[in-house]
Amino acid sequence: MIRKALFCLTALLLLLSCGQEDDHDMEKPEIDMSGVSAFPLTCDVVYRGDSFTFKALLTDNRELGNYNIEIHNNFDHHSHSTDDVDCEPDEKKTPVNPFIYNESFRIPDGMVSYQAESSIHVPDDVDTGDYHFMIRLTDKSGWQQLKAVGIKVRDRN
């Protein structure tokens, strides 16, 4: 009798669970750098003492959360392997005063598409050379997408 009741209860629970929709977000957000105004792209140059504007279209199937921009030197030629194109690297070197940038930006609540624009100043005394520009996009569910591109910091002249 107990076995029969357990079998019926199990069958009932299975039937009820099949009819329910899964309400969990299982998709990562997307970083779109294909637009005409997207910046920086692989191998782009930014200049010491100048500012530039990061631009990208950020999207998610449910709701965006925040994005983070990190810039660090690539003087040792390490890789983050998110871009199909490689820049011709400068010679390896030891950093003396590398450009280091790490800033997070909140995306307004309820957004599924957001045109990100963030102004970044490059100090005039940082080392020139190879750098990685990394964007980390997180949605409200915690899924994260990473985009890393190689850029160059140069003197304007």
Image (cartoon, helix red, strand yellow):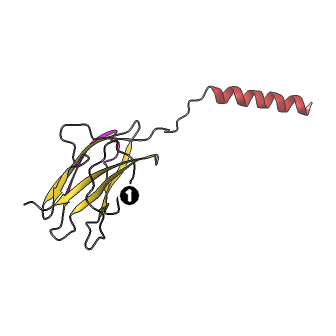
Residue 73 falls in which quadrant of the image? Answer: bottom left
Taking the view exactly as shown, the residue that stands out farthest to the bottom is 96
Looking at the rendering, in which quadrant would you find the C terminus?
Answer: bottom left
Nearest the viewer among 65 and 151 is 151
Nearest the viewer among 107 and 152 is 152
Q: Which residues are magenta?
A: 107-120
Nearest the viewer among 151 and 115 is 151
Which percent across, then down, holds residue 42?
26, 47
Looking at the rendering, in which quadrant would you find the N terminus?
Answer: top right
Q: Residue at x 20, y 59 (%)?
A: 153
Magenta stretch encompasses residue 119: yes
Report the residue marked by disc 1: 78
Q: Amino acid at mark 1?
A: His
Taking the view exactly as shown, the residue that stands out farthest to the left is 157
Question: In the image, is residue 85 above or below residue 94?
Answer: above
Position of 118 with respect to 69 (left or right) is left
Q: Residue at x 38, y 46 (%)?
A: 82
Taking the view exactly as shown, the residue that stands out farthest to the front is 91
Q: Residue at x 69, y 25 (%)?
A: 15
- Name the element at disc 1: loop
